[in-house]
């Protein structure tokens, strides 16, 4: 990281009290993202990706407790007073959620939702805001944008709705966009379109983006850097090209192997990762991936590996027995 | 061949049915009756009606005639005029009391459902206390203390309706507040007031309004029951309940005196229930695509 960071997450942990005990959803995560850069956060369900994004936005559930610092543009969001934080959200920080079925208000028209956001943040008057809304809808690839303004979310398809959600998120020219599984609820054919749209708008507006997904394939061509999360911790972090050329963490390898390949023979059994993520309410000794790792050996069950740089400063991983071969896995 | 044609016909006619099924003729009949009653009550003073309180002791329990279209009651008062002026009272109380309920109960319920925590506990707890208190005894006590008037009656019935509205509003808010669009609004920097008024209220309003119509029906019946017991509007003002109560004295001689206001009340309450049910069905999440 040579440029100064726009967002830096420093030693952030999130704890959620549950009836079964304290659940550590995010465990001492450090991340940095520079202006205009893209960071992919990858991991399976329940590994803390969403909680991390909520922690960045300070939108955690009320009972959750957060420690560490979230520095954005020189301010610590954790300690910012609510009024200034509120102004920052939407203006500088924006989010696109997973499910466009529920992230738009079902009883308000697309136009109302867009125009009001613009009026609220940019203090535009009605007509200007309306014209901006039409431009935004056109920019996210919605045909006949003027007619869409009077439509309700249920009159649009899933892909269209996600485009509208993106238009709302982009409306105030944020510096950082957090896309929390933006394509998981969509058809495969639409997924690529939405991801391309996000990438295009990101370049055009020179905004930073955090792309959260469970699909390594999604981050492959579209991010500058990737952080792989497991059980609340970042277990491998590297520039995207370096990661795919030479992944070191067995979990990353397993994630990649679990993606269906187009050139594989029909009816090939997909190598699933055996077992399930560990119960986060019970701290485990040693590496949290060790019960499911095929390379695990003695030390892995006793000590927790730390995230450390190895051959290059950029590529960090937390593993005692990193994979030595280039990642060409067909287990 | 005939079967083939038949099946095509069926296919064609299937799709439009779904739309018309929602509002049947019963719904429109109910709306029609409501408009009729409202119009009659609102225009009562303009209609060429005899006074509802003028007694004519020579014409007691007179049958229908040109002068008295529906006859007269036990004190020789025009039955039709009393029915229409009674509609005024029944509808005023029946609408105003639930308006008090929907305003206060709806606001409390939304705040409780949105902010949760100690405020919610306090609101739900105090509503439980209000619900647990026997309503008839409460009405008796307050009427005895404050006196018998339409305003007092409306206020008491309104307050008694608050817990139910609070529960409906809170339940709707609880499910909606967890939806992503609320978090999305927060992420866009919306204030609590904005989220409550612009994001949640339009969503909560429909189920609340459907419940409001049922509330109107219940209140009309309750007002009738209270008037029947002599706790409602003070005589000589007529309301449907008090007319049924007065008609009870001459049930053997002229049963129509009790039955006519009862039928008017029955039809009105049924109409409100029908419209309320239809609206509730329309807002049912299983049918309306969200």
Image (tube, coloured by chain):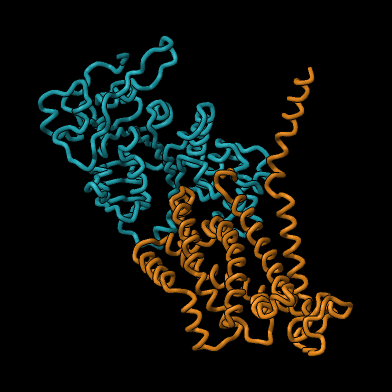
Chain colours: A cyan, B orange
Q: Closer to the camera, A29 or A45? A: A45
Q: Answer with left or right where residue B171 lies relative to residue B150.
A: left
Query: Can you tell which quarter of the image residue A184 is in?
Result: top left
Location of residue A125 in the rendering, given as x and y in whole percent from the top left corner: 62, 60
Q: Answer with left or right where residue A329 lies relative to residue A95.
A: left
Total marks placed? 0
Q: Closer to the camera, A98 or A307? A: A98
Q: Closer to the camera, B6 or A141? A: B6
Q: Residue at the spot x=76%, y=25% of the render?
A: B6
Location of residue B288 in the rendering, given as x and y in whole percent from the top left corner: 59, 45
Residue A92 visible in the current orientation:
no
Q: Answer with left or right where residue B51 lies relative to residue B23.
A: right
Q: Answer with left or right where residue B201 lies relative to residue B245.
A: left
Is residue A142 positioned above or below A260 on the image? below
Location of residue A261 in the rendering, given as x and y in whole percent from the top left corner: 41, 17
The quadrant of the image that shows the C terminus of chain B is: top right
Residue extending farthest to the front is B252
Q: Residue at the spot x=42%, y=40% of the render?
A: A180
Is residue B276 positioned above or below B254 on the image? above
Query: Can you tell which quarter of the image residue A147 is in?
Result: top right
Is residue A255 positioned above or below A72 on the image? above
Q: Residue at the spot x=49%, y=59% of the render?
A: B195
Residue A212 visible in the current orientation:
yes
Q: Residue at the spot x=65%, y=47% of the render?
A: A149
């Amino acid at each position: 990281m040579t440029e100064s960071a726009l967002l830096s997450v420093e030693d952030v942990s999130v704890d959620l009290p549950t009836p079964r005990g304290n659940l550590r959803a995010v465990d001492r995560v450090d991340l940095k993202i520079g202006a205009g850069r893209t960071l992919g956060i990858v991991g399976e369900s329940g590994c803390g990706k969403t909680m991390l994004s909520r922690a960045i936005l300070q939108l955690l559930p009320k009972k959750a407790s957060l420690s560490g610092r979230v520095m954005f543009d020189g301010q610590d969001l954790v300690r910012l007073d609510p009024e200034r934080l509120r102004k920052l959200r939407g203006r500088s920080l924006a989010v696109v959620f997973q499910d466009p079925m529920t992230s738009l208000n079902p009883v308000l028209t697309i136009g109302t939702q867009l125009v009001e956001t613009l009026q609220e943040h940019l203090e535009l008057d009605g007509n200007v805001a309306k014209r901006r809304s039409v431009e935004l809808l056109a920019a996210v690839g919605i045909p006949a944008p003027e007619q869409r303004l009077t439509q309700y979310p249920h009159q649009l398809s899933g892909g269209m709705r996600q485009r509208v959600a993106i238009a709302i998120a982009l409306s105030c020219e944020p510096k950082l966009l957090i896309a929390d599984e933006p394509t998981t609820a969509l058809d495969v054919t639409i997924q690529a379109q939405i991801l391309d749209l996000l990438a295009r708008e990101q370049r055009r507006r020179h905004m930073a983006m955090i792309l959260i997904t469970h699909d390594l394939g999604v981050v492959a061509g579209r991010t500058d850097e990737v952080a792989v999360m497991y059980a609340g911790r970042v277990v491998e972090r590297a520039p995207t090209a370096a990661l795919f050329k030479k992944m070191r963490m067995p979990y990353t390898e397993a994630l990649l192997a679990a993606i269906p390949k187009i050139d594989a023979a029909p009816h090939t059994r997909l190598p699933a990762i055996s077992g399930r993520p560990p119960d986060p309410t019970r701290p485990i000794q040693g590496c949290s991936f060790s019960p499911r790792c095929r390379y695990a050996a003695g030390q892995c069950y006793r000590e927790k590996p730390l995230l450390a740089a190895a051959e290059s400063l950029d590529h960090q991983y937390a593993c005692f027995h990193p994979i030595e071969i280039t990642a060409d896995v067909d287990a | 061949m005939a079967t083939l044609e038949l099946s095509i016909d069926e296919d064609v006619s299937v799709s439009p049915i779904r739309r018309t099924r929602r509002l049947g003729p019963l719904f429109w009949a109910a709306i029609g009756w409501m408009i009729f009653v409202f119009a009659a009550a609102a225009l009562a003073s303009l209609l060429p009606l005899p006074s509802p309180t003028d007694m004519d002791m020579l014409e007691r329990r007179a049958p229908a005639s040109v002068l008295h279209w529906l006859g007269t009651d036990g004190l020789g008062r025009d039955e039709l005029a009393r029915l229409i002026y009674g509609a005024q009272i029944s509808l005023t109380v029946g609408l105003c009391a639930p308006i008090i309920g929907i305003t206060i109960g709806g606001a409390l319920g939304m705040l409780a459902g949105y902010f949760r925590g100690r405020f919610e506990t306090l609101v739900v707890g105090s509503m439980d206390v209000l619900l647990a208190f026997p309503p008839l005894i409460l009405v008796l006590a307050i009427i005895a203390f404050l006196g018998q008037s339409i305003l007092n009656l409306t206020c008491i019935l309104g307050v008694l309706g608050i817990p139910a509205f609070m529960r409906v509003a809170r339940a709707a808010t609880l499910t909606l507040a967890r939806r992503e669009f609320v978090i999305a609004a927060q992420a866009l920097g919306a204030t609590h007031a904005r989220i409550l008024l612009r994001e949640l209220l339009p969503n909560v309003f429909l189920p609340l309004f459907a419940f409001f119509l049922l509330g109107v029906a219940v209140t009309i019946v309750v007002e009738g029951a209270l008037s029947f017991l002599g706790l409602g509007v003070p005589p000589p003002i007529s309301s449907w309940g008090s007319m049924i109560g007065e008609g009870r004295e001459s049930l053997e001689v002229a049963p129509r005196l009790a039955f006519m206001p009862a039928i008017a009340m029955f039809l009105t309450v049924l109409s409100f229930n029908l419209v309320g049910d239809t609206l509730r069905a329309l807002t049912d999440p299983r049918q309306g695509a969200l």
